Image (spheres, grey):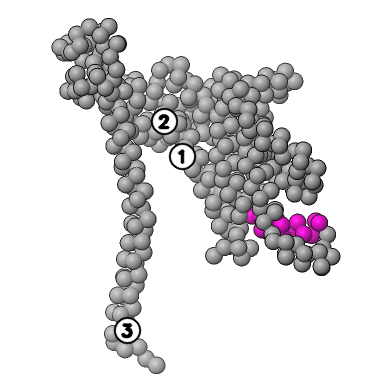
Amino acid sequence: MTDTPLSAPVAKGARRAATLDRIQRALARLLPVLTVIATLVGLWYLACIPMNAQQSLLEAERAGVAITPATAAERRDMGGLALTFGNPGEAVARAYGQERPRLPAPHQVVAELWDTTAGKKITSRRSLVFHAGITLAPTLLGFAIGSLAGILLAIGIVHSRVMDISVMPWAIASQTIPILAIAPMIIVVLNSVGVQGLVPKAIISAYLSFFPVTVGMVKGLRAPSPADLDLMRTWNASGARTLMSLRFPSSLPYLFASLKIAIAAALVGAIIGELPTGAVRGLGARLLAGSYYGQTIQIWSALFGAAIVAALLVATVSWIERVTLRRMGLAR
């Protein structure tokens, strides 16, 4: 059968319609996200005005502008909102360009992020990419240790009633200890036996990441129905065979959901591990330096840098999840 003269235009129109449909669906998914982001940015800009009001009026006074209230004592006693409404012109005009604001404006944080990533060499001590790489090493090591420990602990809990009764409550209780309290203890104890550098921070990351993996794997390993377990017993399958052929494949969706939480927690643990040591490298060091010298823009850029690293790590785990589950036939 030969194509009619109209077949090519019809096919081209169908492709164009399919492309437009995909674009419309993508916009429909992005519109709520963009709306929320725009709202948050707008609220952020508004919050900068009262937060930076005292500094704004101080800069106006240095510039020789007559301001109300007239004395510094009166300004100290007034809140940010009162100062803003008392002298809105100066408060708004100077709220977004201060060198050391209490609350940096979004464009200041974006400019600092761009300058410390694209504007600096990766090997530079002022590069946020360099510091992120320093923090990433204990993050990944701690994540690997915590995930492996969580998986092994979950297998033991599922297969041993004694471990379920004795170990699981202790695992839960361990998460009630504030990490800011236990991190210096871990660093001091390990330092006393000569263990420094990467390992203490990795252990803190592992401490935070093992629990979600343990809970998720326990739930996943217990996901098979009693009928499936009875079927494995009728085939005279051993515990190891049941684990590898039934329990572990069923637990993968739960495992990957837990790994996403664990890898973000591991990054938090690595940053916290840098704080008590007075580190000079890493995202925690950037936070410390910004705090010491009152560089609030640097602090916020480091926080957003950490958030971007966490998002990339979670996205990587999500990609591995899609590939793994698709190959195992557990997802489309």
| Segment colored magenta | 239-252
Which corner quadrant holds the C terminus?
bottom right
Q: Is residue 121 visible?
A: no
The verdict on residue 79 being magenta is: no
Q: Amino acid at mark 2?
A: Ser
- Numbered mark located on residue 308 in the image: 1
> Circle 3 is placed at which residue position?
7
Q: Residue 123 location, x and y as percent?
A: 50, 31
Up the image or down, 320 lies above or below 120; here it is below
Of the numbered discs 2 and 3, the one sitting upstream in the chain is 3
Q: Residue at x 30, y 35 (%)?
A: 43
* Mark found first going from the N terminus, 2 or 1: 2
The secondary structure that dominates the magenta segment is: helix
Label 2: few (<14), some (14–19) or many (≥20) C-alpha neighbours in 10 Å: many
Query: Quick check: 78 left or right of 139?
Result: left
| Left or right: where 50 falls relative to 174 | left
Q: Is residue 97 above or below residue 244?
A: above
